[in-house]
Amino acid sequence: MSVGPTLLSLDVTHAETAARLHMEGQPGTFLTRLGGEVLTVLYRTLPSSAGGFGYAAVAQPQELLGFVSATTQVGSLFWEMGTRRLPALLPPLLRRFVRNPALALLALQTVTYPLLHPADAVPAAELLSIMVRSDLRGEGIGALLLAALRAECQRRALPALEVTVAAANSGAQRFYQRHGFVCTRRFVLYGQPMYRYRAVLSP
Ligand SMILES: CC(C)(COP(=O)(O)OP(=O)(O)OC[C@H]1O[C@@H](n2cnc3c(N)ncnc32)[C@H](O)[C@@H]1OP(=O)(O)O)[C@@H](O)C(=O)NCCC(=O)NCCS
């Protein structure tokens, strides 16, 4: 008899594997191009930052099959990474910028984007990433993770869950649409067309 994955709150112990799954699931994207060390700092920071939360789908013993991460305060996450986590973040980030200066400009867009779109500052949760190990996709792990995240958003009385998806990522868009997300906006970020999806949460 096969046993399904166990869902745990995303925490610092998942950071390194989450970074690996992120790079595998989002090849060629801006965050992936920043590299595993930077992503590991991100996933170490997120669960303990104000408004940050997520879930890990694990198999015994503690093997990470997939995860979802979200925050209600993107600004706090950036603030924490730019202050308390800076000693860990700066060396790998600078190494990347030296190798590829264009990444520094894209990093600036990441920080300025929420400031330039105050309409997004409604009290919704932002789904930052959802990744399932490539050999396990299509088995319902993503649906399990999203259901847990949704339930937690409802418990926190958040009115909506939002996510930005690359227009080219049609698989993820199918996934979100199937789970009640509706496209609300199209825009360009990092020079790439993006869609903003929103799921309204019932109280
Ligand atoms: C999107 C993702 C998290 C879904 O997880 P999952 O465990 O495969 O999802 P489920 O099994 O619950 O649902 C399967 C559905 O996901 C979507 N999907 C997207 N990419 C898929 C893939 N490579 N394989 C299978 N399903 C995929 C499809 O809509 C699929 O339904 P369908 O086969 O009927 O079209 C997963 O495919 C993934 O990790 N993709 C790469 C990372 C990514 O793009 N994340 C979103 C960033 S915004």
Image (cartoon, rainbow, N blue to C red):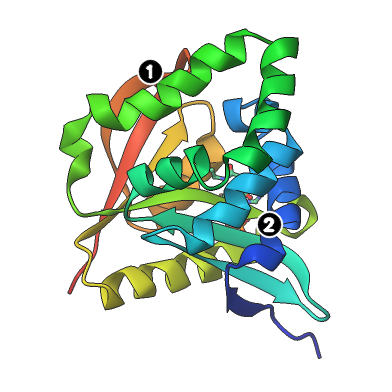
Q: Left or right: where does residue 170 sit relative to residue 154?
A: right
Q: Residue 33 at x, y = what percent?
A: 68, 26
Q: Determine whether the residue tagged by mark 2 lies in a helix, strand or loop.
A: helix
* Quadrant in the picture for residue 200: bottom left
Closer to us: 114 or 90: 90
Tell me how far mark 2 sits from mark 1, CA to CA. Answer: 29 Å
Quarter of the C terminus within the rendering: bottom left
Q: Residue 64 at x, y = what percent?
A: 74, 66
Mark 2 = which residue? 15
Q: Is residue 193 visible?
A: no
Q: Earlier in the sequence, mark 2 or mark 1?
A: 2
Q: Residue 115 at x, y = what percent?
A: 26, 29
Q: Is residue 23 visible?
A: yes
Closer to us: 78 or 87: 87
Q: Left or right: where does residue 160 sit relative to residue 48?
A: left
Indicate the amino acid at tag 2: Ala
Mark 1 = which residue? 188
The residue shown at (49%, 41%) is 83
Label 1 environment density (alpha carbons within 10 Å; few <14, some 14–19, many ≥20): few
* Quadrant in the picture for residue 26: top right
